[in-house]
Amino acid sequence: KDKEEDETTEEDSCSQQNRTSRRKNYQKKKSDGKKAGEEGSRQRERAKKTSTKDQKESENKERKTNKKGKEEENKQKKDRKNSTSASSNSSDEESLSEEELAMLMEQVEQKKKLISTMRNKPWRMVKKLSVLREAQAFVEKFEGALGKGKGKKLYAYKMMMAKKWVKFKRDFDNFKTQCIPWEMKIKEVESHFGSSVASYFIFLRWMYGVNLVLFGLIFGLVIIPEVLMGMPYGSMPRKTVPRAEQATAMDFSVLWDFEGYIKYSALFYGYYNNQRTIGWLKYRLPMAYFMVGVSVFGYSLMVVIRSMARNANESTADGDDDNFIFSWKMFTSWDYLIGNPETADNKFASITTSFKESIVDEQESNKDENIHLRRFLRVLANVLIICCLCGSGYLIYFVVKRSQTFSKMQNVGWYERNEVEIVMSLLGMFCPPLFETIAALENYHPRIGLKWQLGRIFALFLGNLYTFLLALMDDVNEKLAEEDVVKNITRWTLLNHHNSSAGNDSAVTPPPLDPADVPRGPCWETTVGIEFVRLTVSDILVTYITILVGDFIRACFVRFVNYCWCWDLEAGFPSYAEFDISGNVLGLVFNQGMIWMGSFYAPGLVGINVLRLLTSMYFQCWAVMSSNVPHERVFKASKSNNFYMGLLLLILFLSLLPVAYTIMSLPPSFDCGPFSGKKRMYEVIQETIELDFPLFVAKIFSYVANPGLIIPAILLMVLAIYYLNAVGEAYQRANAELKKKMQMQREEEKNKRNNKASTNPMLQDLEDLLTPSTKSESNPKQAEDKKMESPDKTSPVGKQGKAAAMDGSPMTPRRGVAFTPPPHVFVTQPPALGVWSPYPGQPRPRGHPAGPVPGRGRAQPRY
């Protein structure tokens, strides 16, 4: 037992020793593992540090190599640019295929189209600018790559030149716009007073341009050659003041009547010599004078007809804005490129004025009136205006006849000398307001009323002018009769002077007779020219005085006295003045008619008119902006200015008739003017053809001047005018019919859209009424379909089946699908007695056995 106990104790001790040794070994292994892990982590950190250093060094090396590579690439690009075109073309052909080039070309064209239509896009300005920059950068980048082969550089050069040309044209257009005279003034007037008032200033600017050309013709071809190459002042009787008038030739009253030194100057017809050629250039002054006089009318006729044709084309090219006028004005009137505050104010005023114009047009189109009363008032107004016209014509004829008696008297006062001009100016000042007062009875649309007013004032001025001309022709006939007597006296005076100095057969040359002592004829051409110059100057003075007194002083009185007056001067009498469109337009037209008639007898009259138009533009613009107010009924001027041009064309034709009559019928004065010594003025043409041209040219002109050719040519022109007029009317009717068809088609489309919009809610109501019965019938099918689709919801077959089920449902609301009728409810046979069965559409209860049921057919299979 003791041995066994010793053995057991030895075994226990051995096992304890083994355990302790195992523990020590395990602890050693643990410590060795920890040390090894720490050493590994240290090695890893060292490796990471070394790797990061290596990476940084490698990155720096790569950056250096990239920089070197970029520099090399830039050098290579420069070398490629400097290299031959063959290598570049081959590389481009390799880099871009034909499909890529086609796509690139299409993209470039789209970008160009976007650039051209950028202003019409309803985007914000920031988006517009960004998209525009992107499109321009794309076009600049890829446009040069559209060339092929050897033509790439040529194509790129062409595109560059095309861009430069477009930029040059745009800059040149801007330069031309800046060079248009008074453009900003007219825009400012239009923004505050409407297009009708601005049309007058546009017409005034156009007249100024025409008169500048006429002044250049007369001044450059008639006045300058006579002053530089003709006989000097005092060398001839026609260029010298008579002895009896020299004492008062420089008095202001004499000069104000265009007598004295002004009468014997280059301003009038009588100053010019009748020598066939003058100066070392052998300049044919009489021929130049005649041709310039004819070219004044020819150029004016051409310019007026061309302007009328251009205005007609502009009026027919623009479409009618009769649809959605106020919507277009509300949403599209503002210009978002405006950057100047003053321009923005003008644009705001212009939009407000355009709304007023459109409101007036809309009110006039919807106005109801009493037709019989309106007709009676219009007839009464026309009768009163005709009486006024007849009275003014008789007054002018009486005054002209009276002035002829005053001209024969001596010591006549200033009023008697200028009575004709004063009366005509006063009639032109007071008759238009009287016509406007009478026209208030007619109650026309403002635009139509303006045309009637213009026509009546035109008739007034025309009657006054032709009454003046008829009375003036009587004076001319008296002067022609006086010329025959003076002509004989002049010849006897010159003959007696020659005989007295050469008497007694002496060989001494007679002393020259002083030109101031030679008897003079009345020179009726200069007299007519003086009358036209007086009329022009008096019209200028009356116009300016009327503006100062009737507009400016009136506005100052209303403005500053209104605070201490008994009633409201601004709202009542006298109030601020409105700009008289009709009176100013007709004043311009008839002033131009006097210029056309008088320029043949007074070449300097065109220069006076140029100064008048220049000062009128500034003076009237100032008066309008400072003293006038817009019309109570602001109306829109017609798109074409052809009514003004039509009046101007008519006055041009009427002013041509007196000049043509004097050239063809009356003999020129014998001692003044370039046509003196001839029976008729037109003989200068025959003289030039006979002496300066070959014989066959004279024969050709004689054949052309034959009445047998002139009359058929006139008839042919009349037929051509009639044919073209008929064709134009046919085109107008066709355009009107096309507009009606387009309007009807637009209305039909609008009605279709309205009908669809009105029927859609009704159909939706029907769907809502019919869907509950169909839903209960389709519930079992939908549950079974869900069970069938549940095992494979994501499979394409399941999706296709679901889509088919959705397509098959008749009441599924989908966009673009027409409404389908509701499904029919099948009526079955009545169920047998004693056997219960569900109604159609009613679900079968769970406890009901599956299988055939009498009256129901086969049941649904159970899954």
Image (cartoon, grey):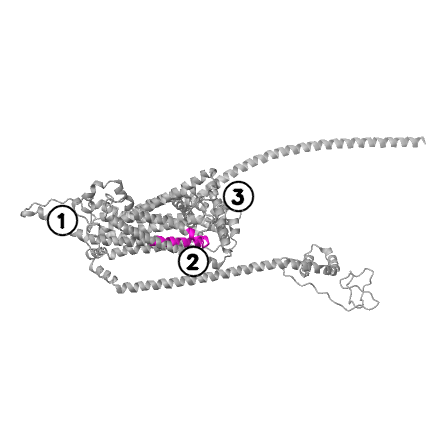
Classify residue 588 as left or right of residue 778. left
Q: Is residue 341 magenta?
A: no
Q: Residues within 10 Å of mark 1 (few under 14, many from 20)?
A: some
Pointer 2 or 3: first along the chain? 3
In the image, what residue occupies the spot 44% across and 42% down? 78
Q: Residues within 10 Å of mark 2 (few under 14, many from 20)?
A: few
The residue beneath circle 2 is: 379
Secondary structure under the numbered disc 1 in the rendered image? helix
Q: Which mark is residue 493?
A: 1
Three-letter amino acid code at disc 2?
Val
In the image, what residue occupies the spot 34% across and 63% down? 718
Q: CA distance from mark 2 to mark 3?
A: 62 Å
Q: In the rendering, at what x and y percent does residue 515 appear? A: 17, 45
Marks 2, 1: nearer the viewer: 2
Residue nearest the observer in this picture, 562 or 821: 562
Three-letter amino acid code at disc 3?
Val
Marks 3, 1: nearer the viewer: 1
Q: Is residue 161 visible?
A: no
Q: Residue furthest right?
A: 1
Q: In the rendering, at what x and y percent does residue 413 appear? A: 27, 44
Q: Residues within 10 Å of mark 3 (few under 14, many from 20)?
A: few
Residue nearest the observer in this picture, 304 or 196: 196
Tell me if residue 820 comes above or below residue 37 in the rendering: below
Question: What residue range appears in magenta?
Answer: 436-463
In the image, what residue occupies the spot 78% across and 32% down? 25
Q: Is residue 65 visible?
A: yes
Marks 2, 3: nearer the viewer: 2
The residue beneath circle 3 is: 126
Tell me if residue 529 comes above or below residue 742 in the rendering: above
